[in-house]
Image (cartoon, rainbow, N blue to C red):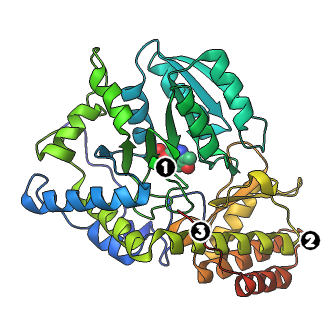
Amino acid sequence: MTVQAPSGIVSLDSILPEEPLLMMGAGPVPIPERVAAANSIVINHLGDTMAQIIEQVKAMSRYVFQTESQHILGVAGPGSAAMEMAIVNLVAPGTKVLSICNGFFSGRLAEMAERAEADVERMIIADGQAASPDDVERQLKLHKPEVLTIVQGETSNTVYNRYLPEIAAIAREHNCLVIVDAVCTLSTMPLSMDSWGIDAVITGGQKGLSSIPGVSLVAFSERAWDRINARKDQLRHWCLDAKLADQFWYKKSYHYTAPVSGILAMHEALRLICNETLPVRFNRHLRCSMALQEAIEALGLSLFVAPEARLNSVVGINMPDNMKIADVLNYISKNYRVEISGSFGPNIVRIGQMGEQSREHNLFRTVHALGASMKALGAPVNVPAGVAALESALGSYVNSAIEI
Ligand SMILES: *Cc1c(COP(=O)(O)O)cnc(C)c1O
């Protein structure tokens, strides 16, 4: 043998922390026990049991996406694979695409469309702002795109495109298909695929849904499916070909070996959402995120995005100029076993409010850990005030009836 087994490899037990870290960053998020248990099971990917599970995954997804779509497909891959699946199936070489770019992930959709040889117009939105329907309409008139891409929540800089329903309606008037990245937002806030007239919705496992990373979902509208069926050219992507994926997801036949464990995990995550119901879940996320935001301000820190365009699913917090973000992340992780995220650009840290992250006990631990860490690193924060504000905001929250 020329290549020897490596020496010095240790077991996972000696690498992983004895007490798991509380995952409060921008994803992956903590998973419920039931999801973890399902993820440990392997079954026949083409048997009757799997077929029954797939039927339920599709039925529950229709509720979570708020759609009657018969074209919901799972993808073995990250949220980005679902993004790419939406893009490469709806965008052919030469297709005119308008990409609304608020940051890193919406920019990724534009890049994917370019790689699919689309003719891409990027509409760059000013930092910290939501895309405005009037501006989008002007771009639609000017460029006459066949496809528009947009992110509901831009995880990278915590901007929320709150006018998504209006923008989707305008795009529809201009006969333009709408692809929405809802990776961090789906099931944390309203998104109604059918009534908003959206043609493709993308989500990953490890954020809003509180499942594992690596298995994602994409839902296509009937209009989108017609376009996919009408394509004459052959897709360059075999794994991501929606018509091939349809073989597994709707015709009980073989495309590739489905990630069975991950789909079982997704099944449990969706079932927990259906049991909780969307209005209750949206309300839980809103209450927790608003209370977190109040607590952060009471600590003496400021929030990165103004309220009009602020995302609730991931909260961006300004860091003092003299503080290294890596130091904060290290300190809070080592001393409090809480993981939060830095960012790809702005001088902020990010705390997620997706799925299991939006639980009161996780908020108390996180607010205390962040405050105490920053204080230890020399920032003038008021830890008791932050924790008290959290308690009071949670207690005084008035249930808002959230329409779906
Ligand atoms: C995380 C995220 C993605 C990418 O998901 P991966 O699983 O990392 O590929 C895309 N869009 C948004 C909005 C995200 O938050």
Foreground residue, 229 or 202? 229
- Cβ of mark 2 under 8 A from ligand 1: no
Q: Quadrant of the N terminus?
A: top left
Question: First in sequence: mark 3 or mark 2?
Answer: 2
Q: CA distance from mark 3 to mark 2?
A: 37 Å
Residue 102 appears in the figure: yes
Q: Secondary structure at mark 3?
A: loop
Give the quarter of the image for residue 34. bottom left
**Residue 402, labelled with which disc?**
3
Q: CA distance from mark 1 to mark 2?
A: 48 Å
Tag 2 residue: 380
Q: Are marks 1 and 2 in contact (CB under 8 Å)?
A: no
Q: Are marks 3 and 2 in contact (CB under 8 Å)?
A: no
In the figure, is residue 366 to the left or right of 223?
right
Tag 1 residue: 195
Image vertical order of residue 349 relative to residue 295, above or below: above
Bin the neighbour count of mark 2 within 10 Å (Cα to Cα): few under 14, some 14-19, many 20 and up: some
Give the quarter of the image for residue 262. bottom left
For image coordinates 39% across by 52% down, the residue present is 67
Q: Please state which of the two labelled residues, at mark 1 or mark 2, is closer to the viewer.
A: 1
The amino acid type, in three-letter code, at marker 2 is Pro
Residue farthest front in this picture: 173
The amino acid type, in three-letter code, at marker 3 is Ile
Q: CA distance from mark 1 to mark 3?
A: 16 Å
Image vertical order of residue 182 relative to residue 173, above or below: below
